[in-house]
Image (tube, rainbow, N blue to C red):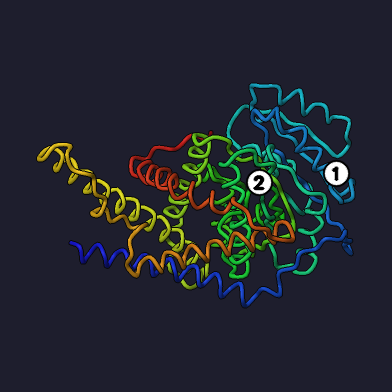
Amino acid sequence: MAFISSTVFYMLIFLSVYVQIFFLVTFLENRKKIIIRSEKMKLAKYPAVTIVVPCWNEERTVYKTVRSLLDLNYPKDKLKIFLVDDGSTDSTWSIINKFTKYPNIQIFRKENGGKYTALNLGLQYLETDFFGGLDADSFVAPESLIRIMSYYEKDPGIMAVVPSVAVHSPQNILQNAQTAEYHMGIYFKKMLSFLGAINVTPGPFTIFRKKVFDDLGPYRHGHNTEDMEIAYRMQKNDYKIEHCNDAYVYTNTPTTIRKLYRQRLRWIYGFINNTIDYRGVLFRKKYGNFSLFTLPTGIISILTVSYLFFRVAYSLFNFLSSKILVLQTVGWGLTPSFSNFDSFFINVQSSLLLVVFVYSLVIFAIIFGQRMAEGKWTFSLNMFYFLFVFRILAPFWLLKAIYNTIISRRPAWR
C-alpha cells in the first residue's frame, strides 16, 4: 500500500513539475513577444463595437462600471453600450436609468434568467461586427479597448481577444491573496495564448467577432460558467483566441472566505462539467494544445490537490490516533512527541526539493504576471498570502465541486 501511495505521489509531482516547466519554456521562447504599451495609440480604422453590461443587484458598482466604458479612449460613435438589468431587486434599474441621456447607450430590463440570458439579449440587438461584455462589478482601463482592437487590425484570423484581469482595490489579506492569484493568472493566460490553448474568455471585457455567434450560436448556460463554455466551443471549432496582456480590467473580488468559497466552487464545478461535456476533444491531436495540454493540466491539478489533501488528512489522523492511544494507555504523564507526524509538507525526503521547485515556479509566475499587469514588479507579501490561503482553502471547494458533480447538484451563483 505504501508503495502504491508513493508511486501515485511521485507521478503527480512529476506531472506538476512538467506543467510548470512547460510554461517556463513557453515563456522563454516567447518573452520578446510580450509587449507592454504605456503610450496612447491610434488605429488605422476603428471598427464599431458593442459592449453589454449584464446587471443583477449591482447597485454599488454599476455606475462606476458604466463610467469606465464612457471614459474609454475610443470614438464614441463607434462604441455602443447595452445595459441589461436581469431582474434586479435593488436600485440597479434606477441607477442605470441615469445614463438614458447618452446617445450610444441603450437600456433593457428583463426577468431574471442568469447572466448568459442577459448577454444573449444584447446579441439579439447587435448591429456591430464586434461584441463584448463587461461584468457590472468590473472597471476597464481607458486604453484597453483600443489595445484589444489592435490585435484584430494585425490578424484577421483572430476571433476573440481576452484582457488581463486584476483585483480592484484589495482591502484585506484574502483579497491580497487573490491579487497574487490574478497576477499569476495573467502570466498563465499569456502562455496559453502563445500555445493557442485558452480555455476561458472572461466575462470582464473579452471582445469577440460577431461571426463567432453567427456561426456557433449564442451563449449557453455552461453550468453557470458561460464564459468557459463559449471558449470550449470555439476551441473545438478551431477559432483563434488571443490574450492582450496590456488591456487591463479591474474587478471586485470576494471579501470573505464564504463568498470566495462559493465563487470558486462555481468555477471548479464549471471546469469539471464543461470538460465532461466536451470530453470528445480530450487527447485529440486535431484540437491542439487545448486538448493535449490545457484540459489535462486542469485534470492533473484537481487530482494532485485531492490526493495531497487526503494524504495530509490521513497522516494527521494516524498521528492523532496514536497519541490518543498513548494517552489512554499511560495517561497524561508523557511529554507529547511529534516525531511520528510525517506530513507531506514537512518531510525531509527528496520530495521536498520537488515541492520547493514547483512553488518557486509558481512564485515566478506571480512575479512576471505582476510585471505584465503593472509594468514592474515589487516584492510583496501577497504571494505568500496566496500560497498560505489557497493551500488551505482550495481542497475544500475542489472536493465539493467533485461531490456536486457526482450527485448532479449545481452550485449557486453567489
Dot 1 lies on which element?
Answer: loop
| Residue 153 drawn at (x, y percent) | 80, 65
- Residue 90 is left or right of residue 147, and the answer is left
Circle 1 residues within 10 Å: few <14, some 14–19, many ≥20? few
In the image shown, does 381 or 81 lie closer to the viewer?
Answer: 381
- Residue drawn at the location 68% of the way across and 37% of the way down: 137
- Residue 207 is left or right of residue 268, and the answer is right
Q: Is residue 17 above or below residue 249?
A: below
Q: Is residue 247 above or below residue 333?
A: below
Residue 356 is drawn in which quadrant?
bottom left
Q: Earlier in the sequence, mark 1 or mark 2?
A: 1
Question: Which residue in the protein does label 2 denote?
Answer: 167
Question: Which residue in the protein does label 1 denote?
Answer: 71
- Residue 23 is left or right of residue 87, and the answer is left
| Residue 217 drawn at (x, y percent) | 61, 50
Q: Amino acid at mark 1?
A: Asp
| Residue 118 drawn at (x, y percent) | 65, 37
In the image shown, does 250 or 381 lie closer to the viewer?
Answer: 381
